[in-house]
């Protein structure tokens, strides 16, 4: 069969077929990277280490540690603020780790395709 217009040979052009294979490979790699991230944990501290919050790769808080000296019944608001600060920092660090892992897979395409 002769080549038709646009390089077709009885179906998709070779370039499109290769692109589809690359997309499927990238999708598998992203799924593997996501599974690896789920097993990771990051701990961040606030108040000089008085409050520590650990988050999982699923971006869920899995642990909160408080030093006795930070637990002041007269200043609950400060403790709340420290917990929020530590949790937000741990989540930010996990997001950075996630973006870096996905960036390795996508080659910096931010999870998208360049078309």
Image: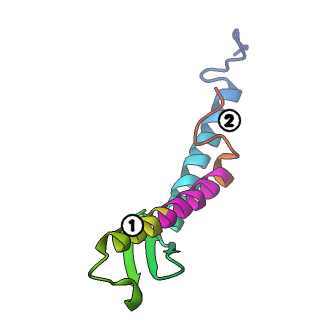
Q: As rendered, which of 15 and 87 lies closer to the eye?
A: 87
Q: Is residue 90 magenta?
A: yes
Label 2's element?
Answer: helix
Q: Residue furthest bottom?
A: 68
**Which quadrant: the C terminus?**
top right
Q: Which residue is mark 2?
A: 18
User: What residue is shown at x 70% (from left), y 8% (from top)?
Assistant: 5
Q: Main secondary structure of the magenta part?
A: helix
- Residue 44 point in image, percent of width and height: 52, 73
Coloring applied to the structure:
rainbow
Q: Nearer the viewer, residue 16 or 41?
A: 41
Seen in the picture, residue 8 relative to 15 is either above or below; the reply is above
Q: Nearer the viewer, residue 97 or 15?
A: 97
Horizontal placement of 71 versus 91: left or right?
A: left
Residue 39, above or below 12: below
Q: Position of residue 114 (x, y in %)?
A: 66, 30
- Within 10 Å of the Cα at label 1, are there few (<14), some (14-19), or many (20+) other Cα atoms? few
Residue 73, placed above or below residue 109: below
Find the distance from the CA under tag 2 to the CA under tag 1. Answer: 52 Å
What label does residue 81 carry, if any?
1
Relative side of 85 to 28, left or right: left
Residue 107, given in percent of the width and then of the height, sits at: 70, 46
Residue at the location (36% across, 74% down)? 79
105 inside magenta stretch:
no
Quarter-of-image position of residue 53? bottom left
What span is in magenta? Answer: 89-103
Indicate the quadrant containing the N terminus: top left, top right, bottom left or bottom right: top right
Residue 100 in picture, x, y percent from top left: 64, 56
Q: Which quadrant of the structure image shows residue 12?
A: top right
Give whichever of discs 2 and 1 has the lower sequence position. 2
């Amino acid at each position: 069969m002769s080549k038709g217009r646009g390089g077709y040979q009885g179906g998709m052009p070779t370039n499109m077929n290769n692109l589809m294979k690359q997309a499927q490979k990238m999708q598998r790699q992203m799924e593997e990277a996501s599974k690896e991230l789920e097993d990771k944990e990051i701990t961040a501290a606030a108040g000089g280490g008085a409050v520590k919050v650990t988050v999982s790769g699923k971006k869920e808080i899995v642990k909160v540690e408080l030093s006795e000296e930070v637990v002041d019944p007269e200043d609950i608001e400060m403790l709340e603020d420290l917990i929020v600060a530590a949790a937000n920092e741990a989540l930010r660090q996990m997001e950075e780790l996630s973006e870096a892992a996905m960036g390795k897979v996508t080659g910096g395409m931010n999870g998208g395709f360049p078309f």
